[in-house]
Amino acid sequence: MSTRPINDHALLSDCRSAALVTFDGSVDWLCLPRFDSPALFARLLDEDAGHWSIRPTCPTEVTRRYLEHTLVLETTFRGRDGTVVLLDALALGSRERGHSLGASSPGLLLRQVTCVEGRVPLEVVYVPRPEFGLVHPLMRSVRGGLVARGGADVLTLSSPVELRVGRSVADVAVTLRAGQSLGFALQAGRAWTPDPSCRAPEHIARRMQDTVSGWRSWSRHHGGYEGPWREQVNQSGRVLRAMTYSPTGAIVAAATTSLPESIGGERNWDYRYTWIRDASFTLQALSTATCKVEKTSFFSFLANACATQLDRGVDLQIMYGVGGERDLSERQLPHLRGWRDSAPVRVGNDAWRQRQIDVYGELLDAAHQVHRDTGPLDPFTRAFLVGVAETAARRWREPDQSLWEIRGSSRHFTHSKLMCWVGLDRAVALAPTLGAGARVADWTRAREEIRAAILTRGWNGSAGAFTQVFGGTDLDAAVLVMPMVGFLPPDDPRVRSTVRAVAARLTDDRGLVHRYHAADGLPGQEGTFLLCTFWLAHALALTGQGAAARQAFETAASYANDVGLLAEEVDSATGEPVGNFPQAFSHIGLINAARAIGDTT
């Protein structure tokens, strides 16, 4: 069973795939060549599912950071007799700079350890376990390292020192003295292709420096935000870039699967995919922390991934693989115990089968945000967006599972209706661009019908708030977005009352916000959501409550780990971050809330 705290991990990325490294120098999660590939190391989910550690064998004090303006991790071990510095990175393509990050990433994990003073004994332990720990590969030493084969994978480990091999484990003990350095590299290939070559130490050092330069070049182009919490916003922008699959522009919701929403429970999902529901707020965050190139790439991915579904009369799918794949069928991995015995571990996500009518609004709002940056839309995209608007006008009366992917029966969720209103509102504004002037009257009529329904059936005077579902009494933090999307002005008494109600009745003693308290068809209880807490900060800023907004923001941001990464939730009982990690939506919420507070206070 893996027990290490989720916040103990740091992210590495080559803008195609991801690794997680623990505070004491162990790579416990690595998927190559894509974010959603089977893990080569998965000790994150089971103690026996593979890892690669480089660490001193003597007592040390440990500190770490990302090298300035990069996602290259520097971990420093200070012992009584000496100090070593470990650098970890997923290599970018050679001389990739600026917006080209990830264009030709080789799927190469770099690790370089240097003794900067005294002497330090080290141990290197290499335990590859492809396919989420199912494969225990055969290893053989080769000149410059070793090769591991098993299943469909072949792994080449470049090593300047000879490792002892036995029972699919390789290790070595070595002592470094001041000025000495060891460079390691791991590259994955397929069993039917030539083995990846071993790399010389000087080549590893050059690739490490080139990756540092690549990230810094990107950061130089994307450091224009000057508002409050600038460092956190810029770091969150780098995280979003790191979680972007560069070939398509898709942004994954998280780098992991099955880190639980409740410890020991069943709320364990695979988040290594892209959700349509994230589109609108993602683009707002990209506008603040990155630039229009990333915005345009993400929207282009969404439009291409969704293509043709509406033509066939089926629901618009809510999520896709990073290459645009549609079938994300879910299966369980019973051989993995899960993080802190939180089983089952799942690969794939059956939420792709759900109906969520909010996605029509998300797509049209995204198109509204980017159309000035993209230039004239091609005929195919124009026709597709007209179809999205037509579908929103036709289906807004239907029940769904909501953006929260409720696994119970479909209901009439207020937020879903709200986003259909957003979609039609943006479609009316886009009509000249879409060549759809003849549809404006019908879209306007449907938009006003939705508005009237929300104001009469979504508002509950006794609750003093817009509620989770039409005619209900339960609250839902998703209604906090009403003033953000322009449905009602922030000074509307119903908006202010709803914000007060969420702050009073969905917020725990730590000041963190639950999504809702209503039954959702799943066993167990989830934690508070960092995204929802940032939404509260955002809504408080818009409604003129600057001090309360700052307090809510600081509360949520305080749950970032030592290198600025945010999980999805916080366990209500222990205050420990839980859920898949790092969570894009949490970083998106941070960026947008910071911008709102800066603009209004």
Image (cartoon, grey):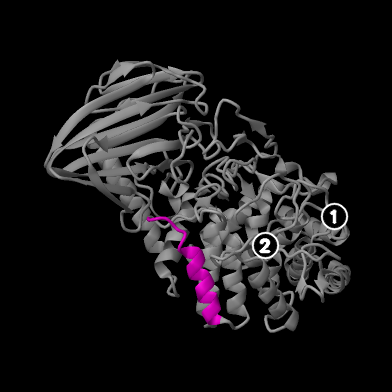
Q: Nearer the viewer, residue 8 or 165?
A: 8
- Residue 83: where, in percent of width, then height? 17, 45
Residue topped by disc 1:
399
- Residue 103: where, in percent of width, then height? 46, 44
Residue at horizontal 25 percent and vertical 25 percent from the top: 172
Residue at horizontal 67 percent and vertical 62 percent from the top: 367
Q: Quadrant for residue 272, please give it.
A: top right
- Residue 10: where, in percent of width, then height? 40, 48
Magenta region = 546-562
Say whether marks 1 and 2 touch (CB < 8 Å): no
Q: CA distance from mark 1 to mark 2?
A: 25 Å
Residue topped by disc 2:
367
Residue at horizontal 66 percent and vertical 31 percent from the top: 331
**Residue 34 to residue 237: above or below:** above
First in sequence: mark 1 vs mark 2: 2
Q: Is residue 59 magenta?
A: no
Q: Which mark, residue 114?
A: none
174 horizontally vs 140: left or right: left
Task: Look at the image and tell me whether residue 116 can be seen.
Answer: no
For label 2, the SS is helix
- Residue 409: where, in percent of width, then height? 83, 48
